[in-house]
Amino acid sequence: MAKESIPRLDNSDIREKLLPLCRLKKGEIWKDPEGKHRIGVLDAASAKNVQTIFDEKQAVLFVHDPPYNIEVGGKNTSQLSRIDIDEYISFSRAWIQNSLTVMGENGHLYIWLGADQKRGFQPLPEFMLMMRSFSELESRSFISVRNQRGYGTQKNWMAVRQELLYYAKGKPPFQVVYTDIPKVLKGYYKTIAGKKTENMERSRSDTIRPGNIWLDIQQVFYRMEENVPGTYAQKPLTAIERILLSSSRENDLVADFFAHSGTTLIAAEKLGRRCITFDNDPLFAELTIRRLEHYRRTGKTGWQWGNPFPETEEKPQGWLF
């Protein structure tokens, strides 16, 4: 089977080669030449950093994918080190508070989170309890997204899910969206305005609406155009698009404090939203910028087997540069 063009960026010597290629250093912000987006190398837990990149702007939708405080792929590295749970919750409380300071009167907040089944499902329950302290936020939904690859095991059920928590502030508008799954349920009747109607007759679509279990979203990235080689926590573009379509409108400002592979920004670009996103690692900020440039240049949402850093590839003998 083919291999990705570059290894995981959190634990590889290739970081030393790639860091000099990054346009941004800690504390710096890249402003989109087209005036739509901003990307930074900033700390989500720093109120000053967040206020600087927002520059008095407010977002209506936040889609955050923080570190889960668990090992990824069985590896524990300097970029994915597991910290004490109290320290992790303190960090989480800070970036949630920072999100609220730049959220409008009405806003949506989505948070991807993991549960380490080997450690009492940390940090999911601790995080959910911490969120109760934010009285301005209402818990809306607990969504599970199926991960087709999962972790194989002969002594337990396969771990094939990621959790997505949804909160709302105030009364933000919500737009119903639909999946590509055909609606096949027949023979179910309900009385509407005194008239008994069948399920298919009431339907506004031939397909079903997503519930809080998303089974229809592909996550086997290496087989997909949207794949960003070197990343280890990429989220499906279809999932982010679903969130943006349901919880924002064209030209709205959306935000992601943990850019990683830049999926929220690409979804915003595709759907006509503006995006502010940042990461504390300059490599992922650079990947996010390059992914946007790549999409605008080629129409492709990722590189699949390609290399987002072609400067690192060996050139044939005889090349002068």
Image (cartoon, rainbow, N blue to C red):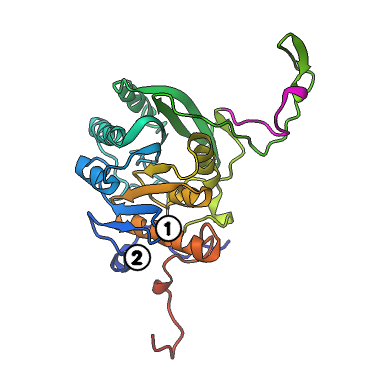
Reply above or below: 94 against 17: above
Q: Is residue 18 visible?
A: yes
Quadrant in which the N terminus appears: bottom right
**Picture quarter containing residue 6?**
bottom left
Q: Position of residue 35 (x, y in %)?
A: 38, 56
SS majority, magenta: loop
Relative height, residue 260 to residue 163 (above, below): below
Which residue shows up at 42% across the image and 58% down it? 230
Describe the element under mark 1 as helix, strand or loop. loop
Q: Quadrant of the C terminus?
A: bottom left
Q: How many marks?
A: 2
Q: What residue is pinned by disc 1?
A: 230
Circle 2/circle 1 CB separation < 8 Å: yes
Tell which of 300 and 246 is nearer to you: 246
Q: Residue furthest bottom?
A: 318
Q: What kind of residue is marked 1? A: Gly
Q: Position of residue 57 (x, y in %)?
A: 31, 42
Residue at 38%, 53% in the rendered image:
37
Say left or right for 6 vs 130: right
- Look at label 2 and name its amino acid: Ile
Between the residue at mark 2 and the residue at mark 1, the CA separation in whole angstroms equals: 10 Å
Name the residue rendered at 27%, 34% in the picture: 101
Residue occupying the far top of the picture: 194
Q: Quadrant of residue 315?
A: bottom left
Which range of residues does the magenta coloring cover? 201-211
The residue labelled by disc 2 is 14
